[in-house]
Each structure stands twice: as C-alpha cells, then as structure tokens.
Amino acid sequence: MKIFTEISRQLVTSDTTPQTETDSVRSDVKDPSNLLQRLQGYVDSLKTIAKKHNALIDFSELNELFAKARQQISDHQFALALETFHEIKETIAEVKRELHEEASKHESQRAEEYAQKYLEQLDRLIENAKKQGVADEIIEKLETAKENLSSADNPKEIIKEIRKIISIKDQFELTKNDRLESRVLQVEKTLSRLSQVDRVDQDDLDDALDTLESIKQHLYKGEFDAANDLLRNLAKQLQEIKNSL
C-alpha cells in the first residue's frame, strides 16, 4: 500500500535507533500526523470487516501502538513515532492474515448453509416434477445435480452446482414455484436474525417456525396457493414482531 511505502521511506531517512531526539533530528523528520490518521482509517476498515464477518480478531495491540504513536507525536518525537508506525505495519500484516482466515471460514460456512437450504428446495422440485409427469431423463438430471451439490465442499463448487441446477430448471421450465422458494429463503434469514435478538418472544418465534414448516410441506406437495397464503400471513407476523422491538 502507498501509505506503507511512505512510512518505509521516512524510516530509511530517520535514525534507526534513537533513544532521544536532538533538535536537528526534529527539524529533519516531518510531523507524521497525516500518516497516522490515514493508517488509523485503514485499521478502522479492517475492524468493520471483522465485525461484518463476526471474526474474533484482537485489535488491542494495534490500539496500544496507535496510542503510543499519538503520544510520541504529541511530544514531537517524530522519528520514534515512525518506528512505532513500523510496528503497526507488522501488526496489521498479522491481523490481515487472521482476518483472511476467519473470512474464508465464514464464507465456507455460509455457502454450506445455503447449499443445505437449496437441497431442501431441490427435494421439493424433484417431487413436484414427478407429480407433473416430467420425463425420467430430466428427473435423473435433477437427482444427479442434487448428489453433486450434497458432495460439494467449498464455496466455488457449491456455486457451480447451483448454477447447473438453475440451468436445468430454466431449460425445462421447472420454475413455477421459484418465487415462493425465494420468499421462503428470505423468511428463514429473517427468522435467523430475530432469533438472535433477546427481546423477541420465543413463543412467537416457535409459532413462526411452525408456520414455515407448514409452508414447506405445502410446497413439497405442490400446493402453491396454500403455501402462498401462509407466506403472506407469516410475513405480516414477522413484521409485527419487528415493530414490537
């Protein structure tokens, strides 16, 4: 990054092992406050990413180093502050490595969860296709796609297999209940978020989950109108829960 390049350039021109700063050193090294501010902004963005991915990253060492650098700048110890910046740079590199690992784990977990939900949809699609008298060849393709998806173990493979399934559905016009299935996924996400809120009544959540299960059963049986009616009611119920918070 440019900011690190600038810091390194200033480090080269400064005394590498100063215990105290002479007047001449103070005059040679510029006030690095702007670099500190920009570096802090970058670390703040890392903190935002960590929060987004629920990554348990310890930023305490960085916070201490920033506090140290601010004090050094306040005391006009600019060369010492640049050395502290070098420590900050090394610590950021370690934090980025940890964050990348955590984000990768989170991405894999989300992909696997989505694959499981999509497999439920695929079960219902296959059952409805059989009831509609869809050709055995198409049923066989869907079942093969289901098997491939269930064995996929990384996000790229999961996305690849889901795209294949979508292509099969589009090719043979098996998309009648896709909009309902999409709404089911949205409802599941909403319920997942609400379940993490302490103020939500557990009985209300249990009732919503029971309704969601009934919706899935209707979809499995090809009873789209009944599923649609229950989805509308469930959407209203979830909105009431959110309004009560």
Image (tube, rainbow, N blue to C red):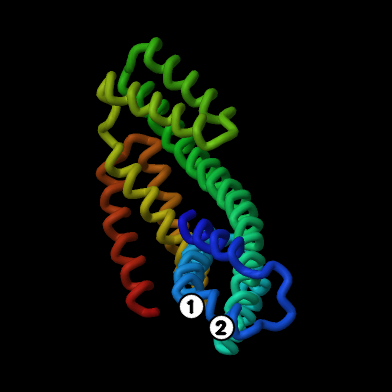
Quadrant in the picture for the C terminus:
bottom left
Visible residue check, residue 20: yes
Visible residue check, residue 205: no
Frontmost residue, 126 versus 166: 166
Q: Residue 138 in the image: x percent, y percent?
A: 37, 15
Labelled pair 1, 2 in contact (Cβ < 8 Å): yes
Amino acid type at mark 1: Ser
Q: Residue 121 in the image: x percent, y percent?
A: 42, 37
Q: Which disc is residue 227 wearing?
A: none
Q: CA distance from mark 1 to mark 2?
A: 7 Å
Amino acid type at mark 2: Ile
Mark 1 or mark 2, earlier in chain:
1
Would you place residue 243 above or below residue 98 in this image?
below
Q: Residue 168 in the image: x percent, y percent?
A: 34, 21
Would you place residue 80 above or below residue 46 in this image?
below
Q: Badge 2: few (under 14), some or many (20 or more) residues near its Cα, within 10 Å?
A: some
Please tell me whether mark 2 sits on a helix, a strand or a loop.
helix
Q: Residue 186 in the image: x percent, y percent?
A: 36, 53
Frontmost residue, 44 versus 72: 72
Would you place residue 104 above or below residue 2 in this image?
above
| Quarter of the rendering containing residue 96 | bottom right
| Quarter of the rendering containing residue 162 | top left
| Residue under the point 55% across and 41% down | 112
- Looking at the image, which residue sits at the far front? 24
Return the residue at label 2: 73
Frontmost residue, 12 versus 210: 12
Return the residue at label 1: 33
Please tell me whether mark 1 sits on a helix, a strand or a loop.
helix
Would you place residue 133 above or below residue 64 in this image?
above
| Residue under the point 36% across and 40% down | 219
